[in-house]
Image (spheres, grey):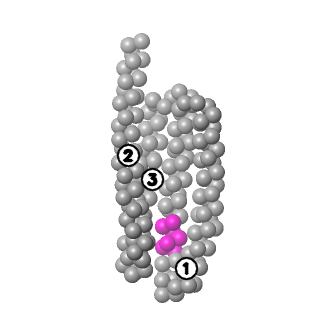
Amino acid sequence: MNRITIVSLKALIAVLLALLVLCQVAVVPAIASQMADRIPPLAYLLWPGVIAAAVFVLCLQAALVCVWRLLTLTREGEIFNARAFWYVDVILVAIVIATVVVLGSLVVITSAQAATPSIALLGVLGVVVGSLLALLVVVLRGLLRKATQLENDLAEVV
């Protein structure tokens, strides 16, 4: 992969990580506090909502750090290595946890009768997209395994 591409991707990941930290620390609690003030009967959902959002963002951050490491392995020419599978597995677990958080949040919001149709639709969309991404990562992990096996076989022949 081109060095400029990898450096550009890493720069964008760094910016995204910084923005996610800002959201996690400042934006989510502020929005949750405003919503609790606006709708007092649902104020008890403030901290569960903040915690769910923090876990969701933490999953995104973990996946981004793993992508960073995979880019480093690619640059070093070591992507077909056992270490790469660990990073892919962490990405998969992060996607699954984030999807479960979205599903749990949707269930809680719906049971509290606080879900508008648009919020319910976004929640269902989040679960579908998360499931799709998890399955996609499983397929890509299989492709990485096959490519690693082929590279090892080729190294033995040469």
Which residue is located at x 38 percent, y 13 percent? 157
Which residue is located at x 60 percent, y 52 percent? 16
Secondary structure state at the residue bearing disc 1: helix
Q: Amino acid at mark 2?
A: Leu
Quadrant assignment, res 112: bottom left
Neighbor class of circle 2 (other Cα within 10 Å; few <14, some 14-19, many 20+) is few
Q: Position of residue 27 (x, y in %)?
A: 61, 68
Q: Position of residue 80 (x, y in %)?
A: 45, 29
Is 23 displayed left or right of 131 in the figure?
A: right
Q: Position of residue 155 (x, y in %)?
A: 42, 17
Task: Tell me where the magenta segment starts and ends, as one range.
Answer: 47-53
Q: Amino acid at mark 1?
A: Met
Viewer-nearest of discs 3 and 1: 1
Inter-mark Cα distance, 1 to 2: 35 Å
Inter-mark Cα distance, 3 to 2: 13 Å
Q: Which residue is mark 2?
A: 136
User: Does the stretch in magenta take in 48?
Assistant: yes
Inter-mark Cα distance, 3 to 1: 28 Å
> Against 140, is 15 above or below?
below
Taking the image as drawn, is residue 80 in sight?
yes
Judging depth in this view, the residue of 88 and 131 nearest the camera is 131
Q: Which residue is mark 1?
A: 35
Main secondary structure of the magenta stretch = helix
Secondary structure state at the residue bearing disc 2: helix
Q: Which residue is mark 3?
A: 94
